[in-house]
Image (cartoon, rainbow, N blue to C red):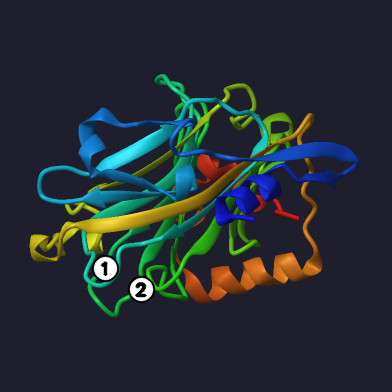
Amino acid sequence: MSSSSSLRAAAALLFICNCLVAVSIATDFVKDVDIDEWGKEHVKVFEDGASLSLSLDKDSGSGFQTKEEYLFSRFDVELKLSPGYSAGVVTTFYLSSLGTKHDEIDFEFLGNVTGEPITLHTNIYSQGEGRKEKTYNLWYDPSEEYHLYSVVWNPERIVFMVDDKPIRVHNNHEKDLNLPYPTKQPMRVYASIWNGDDWATKGGSLKINWQYAPYVAHYRNLNITEYEQGEDHPLTQEDKDYIEMVETEHMIYNYCDAYDKELVRECDVPIY
């Protein structure tokens, strides 16, 4: 069986989550996504649509979005960042709806000078309101090989995952604290690479060095698992310990420490 056929077979696999049947669908980068017009010449598709690269040079960045919208799903992608000097380069994998009152769930990777850690910036918008940033120095080199990045989004919580391990949990506090949470607007999957050197690395003090261009990010095996209902995604004690380790050893910014307590009331409520 060819590698592409194996991927298609694996993507059709059924599995059970909390007694609900869910189907994991492999995204075909030829048929299932729209390439952003502003950088379409910087996009290459490989493996019969199973993988794709986005590149950035002095002329343009690039990006794509899924044609379909999704509500309460799990989103997985394998991503390998551009190696070496990447200060000022922003590479993304995120979900978003449209409009001024949009919802959004972000993975943003902020480049750095060679030998310094890449920064992972996470954020959540609901009804146009953000201020949910948590930022980490990655504890591995995300350009050496592919790593799996996942968002689990259901009515109870949002879980950010790296290599199938949770690193962040954000709970729904609509009922108890009257805080907005993304529950009503379906979102598309987006990915991009672009010039963010006015802010991305050390507050914009380190700029992109175009002699290292093109900067290329590789995406593969984008899988989307829709549930008939939201899965609660309970966390084990091992999961909780891992999140605590990541926050203690690798977190460099926490929105809970940056804003007025009235704006971040959820920070006083236990996560688990």
Task: Give the residue drawn at x 56%, y 50%.
Answer: 4
Task: Give the residue drawn at x 22%, y 53%.
Answer: 199
Which label number is shown at residue 112?
1
Residue 63 position (above or below residue 139): above
Circle 2 SS class: loop
Left or right, residue 87 beside residue 66: left
Left or right, residue 117 beside residue 75: left
Which label number is shown at residue 30?
none
On the image, numbered disc 2 is attached to which residue?
Answer: 117
The mark nearer the N terminus, 1 or 2, is: 1
Q: Where residue 204 sits: x, y (%)?
A: 18, 57
127 or 261: nearer the eye? 127
Left or right, residue 44 beside residue 205: right
Q: Where residue 186 sits: x, y (%)?
A: 58, 24
255 or 116: nearer the eye? 116
Q: Looking at the figure, which quarter contains the N terminus?
A: bottom right
